[in-house]
Image (spheres, helix red, strand yellow):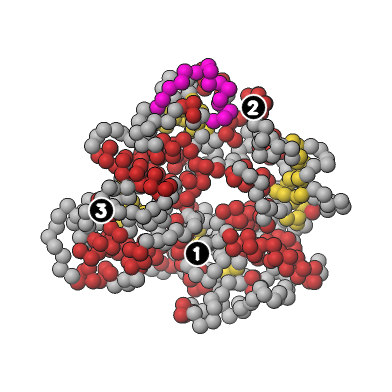
Amino acid sequence: MATGDSQDDVQYVRTLSKQSTAKNVTTEENNNCSEEKDLQTIFENLTTADETEMEEDVSVLLKFRPVDALFSDLTFQLVGSMDADLISLTTYLIESNGGRVVSNGAKYKVTTPVVHAELLPDDPIGQAVVINTFWIEDCIDEDCLVEIEIYHQPIKFQNCQIFAGCVVSFSGIQGRLRDFLQYLVDHLGGKQQQFFSRKMVEAKDVYPSTHLVCPKAEGRKYEKAVKWGVPVVNAEWIIASATSSTRLKETDFGIFRPPGDPAETLSAPTSFSSITFDAPTPVQMGQPTIPVILPVLTDSASEGFLLQTSHGTPPCLPDAVSRISQRPNASQRLNESKRPNASRYSGHSFRIMFSGMSQEDRDSCVQIIEVLGGIAIDGKHYDSTCTHLVVAKLECNDKLMTSIAAGKWIVHPGWIAKSEQTYHFVDERIFEWGNPTSNDSISKEEARISAAAYYWRTIRNRGLSTGPFQGIKAVLYLRKKNDAFQQLIEAGGGEVIAPELALENGKTNLCVLDSREINKIKLRLYVSKGIYCVPPNYLRDLILAKDNKCQWAECVLPEFLPFLDTIPSTHI
């Protein structure tokens, strides 16, 4: 392929992807917020790629789809290199949402995110819109026909080993764009991993990272990449390389700090030079030499630096958190100050988690907590041993909802700031979300969540209930996050039954089911056992409903509605 053609390809990709990239990136400091958003997404927008043979019940259920379904009056043609299982699944997703799959003359041509050029020839008429399966999933998730972004368009390739030898890690790139980039790397000869590592860690199947993909010159992984000499590139490097079927030079897609940045003490490798995308830079073809830093075994634990990627959108942090992060000597001041005598708030019984806070703010809070004698639990997932969750912004993520269901203290970051000032843990009540003594200026949705947090803490502490899921014995049919949902149900006083025992033990009363996993079960069997099938967001609604129980008939999946007449209506 000529260099001029490659330049055109790169410029075309840059033009298409600038806006998409901007909408899908976040800063590294807020990466730890990101995994916490997963449960909210799953509650409302579960997607699936489980390829199992659909049972006869599915064809019956399709007859009940609404007239104004998502893909009503739209036709789709499946093309390219889709295997039989993917064709079966994609057909089901389209038809269960009102669309029709045809052999020709369709409005949309659907294929995989990457497809060999010979399997997807150009349309001479150009009437069909060519999209990949991600667009189908996103439309279903958003319940509307979403705008076609760069990551919804299939990339035609000729070389399936473009990224051979590359181990790619990501930072600050989220959502469907991240899924798309990972798919490209995996299917074009490379390996993508959630860790950014300097060394081989066989126990965790972690390899030394050869590339870091991120949107900005900031964050811990960026600092380490520069220190270790690992190339740091933007998302366009992957897309442009895939589009041109050649691995392009990293230097043309590098991420650098602005000149004069105070953090420039860690200088970039000399082989990198600053570029601007306002004026296209000529692209040199060929296989670049990748500087790979070999692991150096030392006595320092930091030499094995291993960062796990997290996801999310940075929330607006309260002033209290900002004040904490601006106190670099907070722990030193606390250590040097004379503290009051120990009391209930002396710290020994405090095990504290965080949600919706940047890593910098968490680090500051951890210092204060440890000096006060508490224990900071700085993981991304819920820990049942915690006593408090410090939340900067209320959102329905797994850590927050599980903490609420378990009756934990849900408090503002101001609690940490005030405790720092008084040199001991102060009374939580005036900093508790939802507490009548706390004067909050919050949105309507935040008010619902905070009210539930206060309700379940007080009810459970008084021994009046074991939680919002008391009496529930549920079986789960979810493609992912089964562990998170099981933890949620058990934290709220419920019980999770193994699928193989659900129909036999006579105790199961609930099936939490993603509608796109419906081909895994026979609804009539569940009806005959008195088991109601509800979507995952029923669990969220039950937490937020507090003492107002949710009617079964108002909560079941649409596919379950035809069977309601054959099963008694009841409450949980």
Q: Which amino acid does label 2 sit on?
A: Phe
- Which one is closest to the eye, mark 1 or mark 2? 2
* Residue 237, image quadrant: bottom right
Disc 3 and disc 1: Cα gap in Å? 32 Å
| Earlier-in-chain disc, 1 versus 2 | 1
Does the magenta portion include 563?
yes
**Which residue occupies 44% across, 56% down?**
33
Q: In this view, does 181 lie to the left or right of 32?
A: right
Q: Is residue 374 left or right of residue 117?
A: left
Circles 1, 2 touching at the beta carbon (< 8 Å): no
**Which residue occupies 82% across, 49% down?**
127
Circles 3, 1 touching at the beta carbon (< 8 Å): no
Task: Please state the horizontal and vertical placement of residue 75, each as a whole percent of the image.
Answer: 76, 39
Task: Please state the horizontal and vertical placement of residue 356, each as a whole percent of the image.
Answer: 41, 56
Q: What residue type is labelled 3?
A: Ile
* Residue 207, image quadrant: bottom right
Does the magenta portion include 329?
no
Q: Closest to the observer: 499 or 447?
A: 447
Q: What stretch is highlighted in magenta?
A: 557-572
Name the residue that disc number 1 marks. 27
**Which residue occupies 47% across, 18% down?**
568
Disc ID at residue 430? 3
Q: How crowded is mark 3: few (under 14 residues within 10 Å), some or many (20 or more)?
A: some
